Image (spheres, helix red, strand yellow):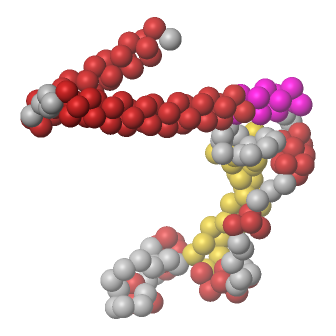
Amino acid sequence: MNANTSARNARSESEPDMSMCAGGGRGVCFASVQVREYFRILGDNPSVTSGPPISLSWEYDEDLSGRCSIDEWEGMRCHERRTRLQFRVPEEVRMDWVLDAGYSPDQVREVVGAIEKERRELMSSVVKSRLQDKADVVAEGVKKRLARAVGKREKSDALYTKWVSSVGQREKTKLLRRATA
């Protein structure tokens, strides 16, 4: 009987009793919450606007980890949700965190520099793409006006065929540029 009791207790912690779930057992139900504190590491996320990005390590501090029931968790946690702005960590605090984690100032500068370079390249690409789109629209308009002025306008299926071949040609050109870069 003792062996059955411990097996049941172990199961009840990992597999909740479905009779406790609202809706008669259909849906999702949790029995406990496991809280882990993961180590902070120097990240690589380019969306950070200034300073070093922070990521979570795969490793966590087992001494600070714990498990409790859902009811205990809900009783302990703050009932007010934080806003997005409250989740932002100032640059100085992030810098302290990565230095405390053992990263050198040179490592931080290297990562921040790489992220800034990636951001500049992305913005340049976006600007070039927008300019190319505008140029394509202007060129198409000029082509239509010239065709009307000369009185020589192609059928729409011929225009479609040309468009498909030009899109294919653009893709080939892009692939060649990437291959030679």
The residue furthest top is 180
Q: Image check: 43 left or right of 101? A: left
Hey, which quadrant is residue 150 in on the image? top left
Q: Residue at x 42, y 90 (%)?
A: 22
Give 25 or 82, whichever is nearer the viewer: 82
The reply to whether residue 162 is visible in this rendering is: yes
Query: How many numbered dots are placed on residues in this image?
Result: 0
Give 14 or 98, whichever is nearer the viewer: 98
- 159 part of magenta stretch: no
Q: Residue at x 88, y 51 (%)?
A: 93
The reply to whether residue 59 is visible in this rendering is: no
Give 30 or 171, whichever is nearer the viewer: 171
x, y percentage for residue 119? 66, 35
Q: Residue at x 37, y 80 (%)?
A: 27
Q: Residue at x 66, y 45 (%)?
A: 47
Hey, which quadrant is residue 179 in on the image? top left
Q: Main secondary structure of the magenta part?
A: helix
Q: Is residue 104 above or below residue 180?
A: below
x, y percentage for residue 70? 60, 81
Give 70 or 89, whichever is nearer the viewer: 89
Q: Is residue 102 above or below residue 174?
A: below
x, y percentage for residue 33? 60, 72
Q: Image check: 141 left or right of 147? A: right
x, y percentage for residue 113? 76, 29
The region drawn magenta spans: 104-115
Q: Image check: 53 left or right of 176? A: right
